Amino acid sequence: MSKFIWILSSTFALICIILIIMSFASKNVETPEYKVIKTIDEVEIRLYPKMLVAKTSLADKSFDDQGSNGFRTIAGYIFGGNEKNQKIAMTSPVVMNMGDSSSMYFVMPKEYKKEDLPQPSSKAVVISEVAAKTIAVVSYGGYSSDKKIEEHIQILSKILTQNDIKTKGDFMFMGYNAPWDVINRKNEVAIEIEMQ
């Protein structure tokens, strides 16, 4: 019996080590460049340039219900589900627009222009541009859920209201980690704001 326990604990330790290594390896993933304009309590005000994205529509704004489906649809495109069977590097964050017409998108690597990207094989994926915008952001760690996202939306809303900052559009969830990243997880909720 002790040999079985030793094998089981060794296997568990090996899996943990692999997951930790994979967590650190994913830190080399490209992220969009932005400029921090201001910090107010937990909120960062950031200016993002326009971005090229691969986007899919979602049935509703529930992260718990739609997050995996949206991720799989777009991941299919970058993992070769396109007219050239071309693999495209993963970037982060994955962005979920949480409005009445919800969607999810991956930002395309900055080396690409729209005409350079292969056409998606799936009609559910569209290549489009997201305009430059100023957004307010609150960050948090751990795994996300509808409950956690809503808690942080409330924090963000309260700080923006207290500082008379006007918003436009819908809230967004931004996830920076692959599901197998077990440490150093980073999530954000954000909303576009009106600059005065």
Image (cartoon, rainbow, N blue to C red):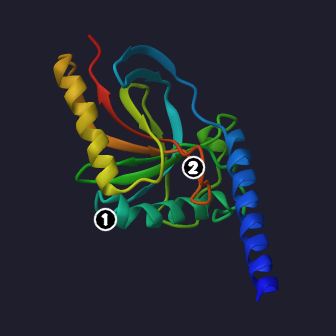
Q: Residues within 10 Å of mark 2 (few under 14, many from 20)?
A: many
Q: In the drawing, does residue 30 fall left or right of residue 187? A: right
Which of 52 and 118 lies nearest the eye of the viewer? Answer: 52
Query: Is residue 86 something that shows in the picture?
Result: no
150 left or right of 139? left
Quarter of the view holding residue 31: top right
Residue at (27%, 47%) from the top-left corner? 150
In depth, the one of 16 and 83 nearer the eye is 16
Q: In the rendering, at what x and y percent does residue 98 appear?
A: 30, 49
SS at circle 2 = loop
View extreme (front): residue? 2
Amino acid identity at mark 2? Asn
- Check the image and report above or below for 150 versus 39: below
Q: Which residue is mark 2?
A: 177
Residue 73 horizontal/vertical position (percent) = 51, 64
Query: On the rendered structure, is 65 left or right of 115?
Result: left
Decide: is 147 above or below 195.
below
* Image vertical order of residue 102 relative to residue 128, above or below: below
Residue 59: which numbered mark, if any?
A: 1
- Looking at the rendered structure, the kind of residue marked 1 is Ala
Assess whether mark 1 and mark 2 are in contact (beta carbons under 8 angstroms): no
Q: Is residue 23 visible?
A: yes
The structure residue drawn at horizontal position 37% and vertical position 53%, both measured from the top left corner, is: 103
20 sits left or right of 167 in the view: right
